[in-house]
Amino acid sequence: MAPTLAARLAPALEQLADGALARRPFALELWDGSELPATAPSVDGARPAPRLRVRDPRALATIARHPDQLGLGRAWVTGALELDGDVEAALAACEPLSGAQLGWRDRLRALRLARQAGVPLRPLSPPAAEARLHGRRHSLRRDRIAVRHHYDVPTSFYRLVLGPSLVYSCACFADPGESLEAAQERKLELVCRKLALEPGMRVLDVGCGWGSFATHAATRHDVSVVGITLSPPQAERARKRVAEAGVSDRVEVRVADYRELADEPFDAVASIGMVEHVGAVNIDAYATTIRRMVRPGGRVLNHGIARLRHGEPEAGPFSERYVFPDAAPLHLSRVQLAFEQAGLETETVEGFRTDYERTLGHWMARLDAGAERALELAGPERLRVWRLYLRAAQSGFRTGFTSIYQLKMVRPV
């Protein structure tokens, strides 16, 4: 009897990356039905090893050419790579292999061994959900395209995941059993309180999304708000929410970039979940713009994700191509330095790492419960992206790779 494909590939894995790929805390099922069993214990030693199913031989050729998040991402998003078991468990199982390096010699050896094993060498084509941006990074034109890649999805999809609040940033929980809606309401009110909003104030909402904060601030604190977003569908939905709340006379929503603003000054500025899209190349200019937008004595609230570890890339290939193109969380120290150099004085810094981990858990549960509807709204590729993205993000907050902070600042008089 001829050896199975798995039997022919097993020796090849032992020769790559100093044998790191042969020590697998997951099983690998190939398209011919043969299997490479797990050869290392699971991370917690309790749950069964997850099983990765290679449905299409082109997945292996893709991963051999891009032995990182990009190759795995393409295989996952196209459906050529599937999973039996919990996605979170699979992420934990793959973590020990994250340090495995495939140099050019390993890549050539992998291609040669694959050919000997009879594995087709033609890779997968990039899926439709993969962003392929061109032009200068963080230019006005490219930023518009990058943002719309993520946000120009039916609002119904976001409502399914985020809930009726449509707040796409971490909630602030009073206790573990609190509902997501109540925790998001608390977060919005916390921002208003930190900005010391009073009736009649004029507020700028940078990255206003679907208008959640602008509507809350106008209805609860009787302020006027100008909100900006780069996504036309977001702006359209935000205007509808503003009208439904009866505050169209006090809230204006624009499709605009922060670099295009010229109608300062405002009494307060809120930037919630926006700074992650700015990038290291523009963080100083962004901080200078925010400082210019607020009057002397006015407050600024910057709410954003930050990297905790130094010496690592801003973002991985999976996020770059499928989730948030060109977006990357900077270190808190870098963001704070930019604002201080721009002339803003820090008053408080507050972290919400565990709150974001819990928020992501709510979003994951809602996506899983509404998977059939999500598939109708966004398609199979986008659904696969979100299933992986939300769990990877939660893992980042749980393990201390990322956190999130609110910087409350004031422009000195």
Image: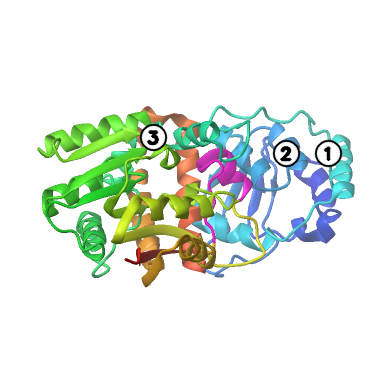
Q: How far apart are marks 2 and 3 (CA)?
A: 43 Å
- Bounds of the magenta span? 316-330
Viewer-side residue, 394 vs 210: 210
Quadrant holding the C terminus: bottom left
Tell me the SS state at disc 1.
helix
Task: Name the mark on residue 60.
Answer: 2
* Earlier residue among tags 2 and 1: 2
Residue 135: x and y in percent read: 63, 31
Residue at image position (78%, 30%) is 120
Quadrant holding the N terminus: top right
Tell whether label 1 touches label 2 (CB within 8 Å).
Answer: yes
Q: In which quarter of the image is residue 215?
A: top left
Residue at image position (89%, 39%) is 112
Tell me the SS state at disc 3.
loop
Tell us which disc is closer to us: 3 or 1: 3
The residue to which callout 3 is attached is: 256
Residue 255: x and y in percent read: 36, 32
Q: Quadrant of residue 109?
A: top right
Q: How far apart are marks 2 and 1 (CA)?
A: 9 Å
Residue at image position (82%, 56%) is 17
* Earlier residue among tags 2 and 3: 2
Q: Is residue 166 at all visible to an observer of this figure?
A: yes
Q: Which amino acid does label 1 sit on?
A: Ala
